[in-house]
Amino acid sequence: MAEGLLRDGVPRVAIARTYFAVFHAVRAQLYAEGLEPRTHGGAQHLFNLHFVRTGRYGPSTSLLIARLQKYREDADYAPAFVVDEAGAREDLDAAHRFVADVRAALTG
C-alpha cells in the first residue's frame, strides 16, 4: 500500500502506512515470544528491551521505529507536516528490510 501511495505522489500518507507495516512486524515478533503490548509505545518499549538491547536487532531498528511513529502521528495530526518523496522512499526501503528480517526470524 505504501509503495502505491508513494508512486501516486502522497508521501505523507505513504509514511504513515509504512509505520503500520513496521508496527505490525514488531507486534508479530513480540507475540512470537509471548509478549503482548497494550499500546504502540508499549510495543516499542518491549521490542527495545527484548530485541534491541539483547542484540537481536541493531540500534538503527529502534531509531526507525521511533522515527516512523513520530512521522505517523505528525502525518495524521499536524497539518503543517511535510515529508519529501526521497525521505519517504528511504524509510520505506528500511521498513521493507525490517519486515523481511522479522519474517525470516519467525519462519526460521
Image: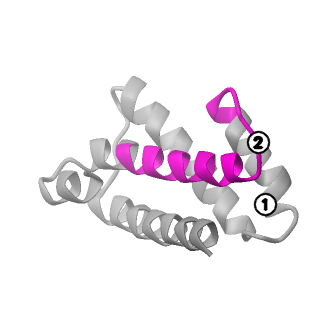
Residue depicted at 18% across the width and 56% down the height? 4
Residue 14 in the figure: left or right of residue 52: left
Label number found at residue 35: 2
The mark lying in front, picked from 2 and 1, is: 2
Q: Residue furthest left?
A: 8
Q: Indicate the quadrant where residue 89 lies.
A: bottom left
Question: Helix, strand, or loop for circle 1?
Answer: helix
What is the total number of numbered labels drawn onto the structure image?
A: 2
Residue type, mark 1 in image: Phe
45 over 56 or under it: above or below = above
Q: Position of residue 41 (x, y in %)?
A: 68, 34
Q: Position of residue 12 (x, y in %)?
A: 30, 44
Residue depicted at 67% across the width and 67% down the height? 60
Residue depicted at 62% across the width and 33% down the height? 40
Residue type, mark 2 in image: Leu
Residue depicted at 69% across the width and 57% down the height? 62
* Part of the protein shown in magenta: 17-41
* Disc nearer the start of the sequence (2/1): 2
Residue 36 in magenta stretch: yes
Q: Nearer the viewer, residue 86 or 23?
A: 23
Residue designated by label 1: 51
Q: Quadrant of the C terminus?
A: bottom right
Q: Nearer the viewer, residue 71 or 105?
A: 105
